[in-house]
Structure formats: C-alpha cells, structure tokens
Amino acid sequence: MSGLRRVLAVLLPLSLLALAAGVAIGSVSISPLELWAVVRGQGDALHRILLLDLRLPRALSAFAVGGLLAVAGALMQILLRNPLADPYVLGLSGGASVGALTAMLAGLGAVMIGGAAFAGALASTLIVFGIAHGAGSWSPVRLLLTGVVVAAGWGALVSFMLAVSPSSELPGMLFWLMGDMAHARNPAVPMAILLVVVLAAVPFGRTLNILARGPQQAAALGVAVRRIEWLLHLAAALLAATAVTVAGSIGFVGLIVPHLLRLIIGNDQRVLLPASALAGGILLVLADTLARTLIAPEQLPVGVITALLGVPAFLYLLHRSPA
C-alpha cells in the first residue's frame, strides 16, 4: 500500500490548504496570522464568528459533497465498466430535483426539502433498477439506457414544474438546480457517510479491481459478482443522494475527478477511492470559494463553476483518450 501512502502524503496537505483558503478568502479577507489566532482560540470575535460559524461549516460541507460525488463516480465507473460514467447516470439528480422542487412549492422548510430530495433520489434508483431488471437479468448497457430514459423523464417533470411555478419561487429553485452551497451548514452527516463508505470499500479494493475487468473473469476467480454489484449500486446511490440532498445538482465532479486520477495514479481501487474522496473535496472547496468571491458581494451557484472547469477538462481528456 505504498502507493496509497504516497497519494495521501500529497492530497492530505492539499486538502488542509484548500480548507484554509476556503475559510480565509471572502468578502472579508483574513490573513494567515489572523486565521492562526482563531485556530488557537484567540483573535477578533468577529473573525471567530465569521470563520467558525459561517465559513468553516460551508467549507467542510463542500469538501464532503465533493468527496461523495467523486467516490460515487468512481464506483459507477467500476459498476458500468465505463470510465465516463458519473453519479447521476441512473437519474438520481432528476429524482432528487423533483422531490426538492415539490417541497419548495409546498412551502416546506430546508430540512424537509433535503428529505424530499433524498427520497426522490432513492425512488429514482429503485425505478431504474426495477425497469432495468425486467423479466430477466440486467446488463450494464441495459441499466445505463434505462437510467438515461428515466433521467429524461425527470427532466421533463422539472421543466413542467418550473413553467407553472410562481415567479417568486423561481430564483431559489434555479439555484438549487444549479448546485448551491449557501445553505449547507451541517457537514457532520455527509462527512460521516463519506468516511464510512470509503473505509468499508478500501478492504474490498482487490475484489473491485477484478470486477472492473469484467463479470465473467471476476466470476471465474470466485468473486460473488451479483452481490458485489448490488452493493456498489447501493453505495453509489447513497453517496450521490446525500450529495444532492446537501447541495443540489453539481455536475462534473463525479465524472472528471476519478477519471483524471485513474490516468495519474492508475486503476487500483485501494488507492483510487481514498484519492477520489480527497481530490473531489479539494476541487469543490476551491470551486465554492470562487463562487463566493468571483462577483462578490453576489454569489454564483457552485455548479456553474464546476461546469466551467469541467467542460474543458472533459474535452481535453476525451481528446487524449485513444479511439
């Protein structure tokens, strides 16, 4: 596991630097000395409130959401044996969007909106699994096609809801659909889910490496293919649903991060999954910092920043990939 130690030696310090930048940079800039004073329990009272009560929870939430999406993307790419799969391929984002928008139109609070988004994401997963299985067994291609069709159906429902919604509700709905960290204030739950899934998945890294080569080869080597695939489905769905519940629909993190890491550090899942968690967190913290400061005092949805960064990165990776 020397490869894992090398990767952690690079990504852990970068994670701390990204979090430090996320809490220090904003409409009120805080110098490194002032930041260190707050860390030691000293410093100005206003700085302590700004850092500990506002910026730090948001930065930690962004880190957790980025890690959730990146690990979910890595698991989906193993499951579908497609390096360009992402966490939303099964219509999770669309189902969560319909649930969240329904709660917003009903005038429910933030907690209920998050719960409705989570329920919609899980409902989408169950629908896709049920339809893809059909009367017989499913294949990755069948599952992928079913997810695309179900996602299109959710997209039509979202468009209909936006068309009939009161104009006063539209800004909040659109921000949620584009991905927004403004209301993410409780990083404990997403961070705990990320940590548990990564720690549970790493010991199975060798099995996942075999499964990534194909189900026939994995079965011949004694891997319980169907059971592992179901566990991957459930883990990816839980990670993506949690991320969508916290921050709305944020694209490209789950696609770009594991794909880029695979090109840099290889395809050993024992290294790739922890690296994806850290790199995804770093990316989203930096993207959210840009979203807060680029046109300050106004804020951009963080999904806009990830799309602006992700589209050229994806096109570059696609251009570099062999035909």
Image (cartoon, rainbow, N blue to C red):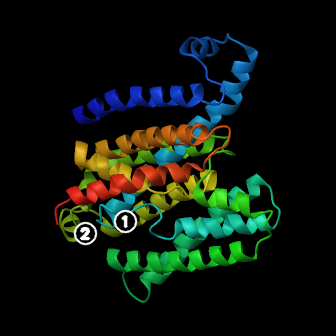
- List x then y, in percent, for residue 303: 54, 53
Residue pointed to by mark 1 = 229
* Between 127 and 41, the one nearer to me in the picture: 41
* Residue at horizontal 45 percent and vertical 38 percent from the top: 282
Is residue 137 shown left or right of residue 294?
A: left
Q: Amino acid at mark 2?
A: Pro
Locate residue 168, reporting x and y percent. Answer: 81, 63
Residue 215 circle label:
2
The residue lying toward the viewer, choosing from 3 and 247, is: 247
Quadrant containing the N terminus is top left
Which image quarter: residue 94?
bottom right
Q: Is residue 28 above or below residue 281?
A: above
* Disc 1 to disc 2: CB gap under 8 Å: yes
Q: Earlier in the sequence, mark 1 or mark 2?
A: 2
Q: x%, y% of residue 64?
A: 53, 42
In the rendered image, residue 236, in percent from the top left (x then y), is placed at 46, 59
* Amino acid beneath label 1: Glu
